[in-house]
Image: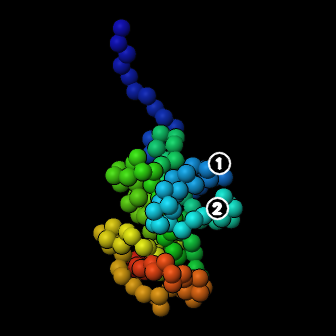
Amino acid sequence: TQGYGIMVHDDPFENIRPMRLEDIPDVLRIMESWIEQGVLVRRTEADLQRKLADFCVFEADGTVRGCGALHRYGPEKAEVAGIAVDENFGHAGIGRKIVQYLIEEARRKGLVGVFLLTTRTADWFMKLGFLRSGVDDLPPERRATYDQARKSQIYVYPLK
């Protein structure tokens, strides 16, 4: 016999949600190859625990496939950071979805703009609407921690 019907799930197949403590090992695993390539700055389990509320994860079929963070600086700006996607899903548009989610999150929080630092993926961020900027446009507290040795390019995305 054949079965016909509809299967209903409480959870959508794909979703972006706040990161939970139990997601940290998966997030570190996903970030590792990007850290080794010099694309991402190394983060530890303690770093992720400290910034837990800033991170979101992209989940597909119950498995974490990507992550990103929105680090707030003052009342008006936030940094989009830590964007990483499982290399086996690199061409599935997950990174774009995470960045768009973070931009909308910044809008919901009433921020004026977001910025990011990148060493290798500038073209990709420009395709998402980010504009080239400079160190002087960083919030003072972020400018103080800018690593000159990494030679990161700075991009902004105005929200208003």
Nearer to me, 30 or 73: 30
Give the labeled residue for mark 2.
Answer: 44
Q: Residue at x 42, y 87 (%)?
A: 134
Instruction: Give, as a three-letter code, the residue at label 2.
Output: Thr
Residue that appears at 52% across and 76% down: 78
Residue occupying the far top of the picture: 1
The reply to whether callout 1 and callout 2 are in contact (CB within 8 Å) is: no
Gap in Å between the C-alphas at discs 1 and 2? 14 Å
x, y percent for residue 113: 46, 79
Q: Residues within 10 Å of mark 2 (few under 14, many from 20)?
A: few
Label 1 CA crowd tier, 10 Å (few <14, some 14–19, many 20+):
few
**Is there any visible trace of residue 62 in the rendered image?**
yes
Q: Which mark is residue 22?
A: 1
Q: SS for tag 1?
A: helix
Q: In this orientation, does residue 101 appear? A: no
Q: Residue at x 45, y 78 (%)?
A: 152
Looking at the rendered structure, the secondary structure element under dot 2 is loop
Residue 159 image position (x, y, % from top left)? 42, 77
Quadrant position of the C terminus in the picture = bottom left
Q: Residue lying farthest bottom?
A: 136
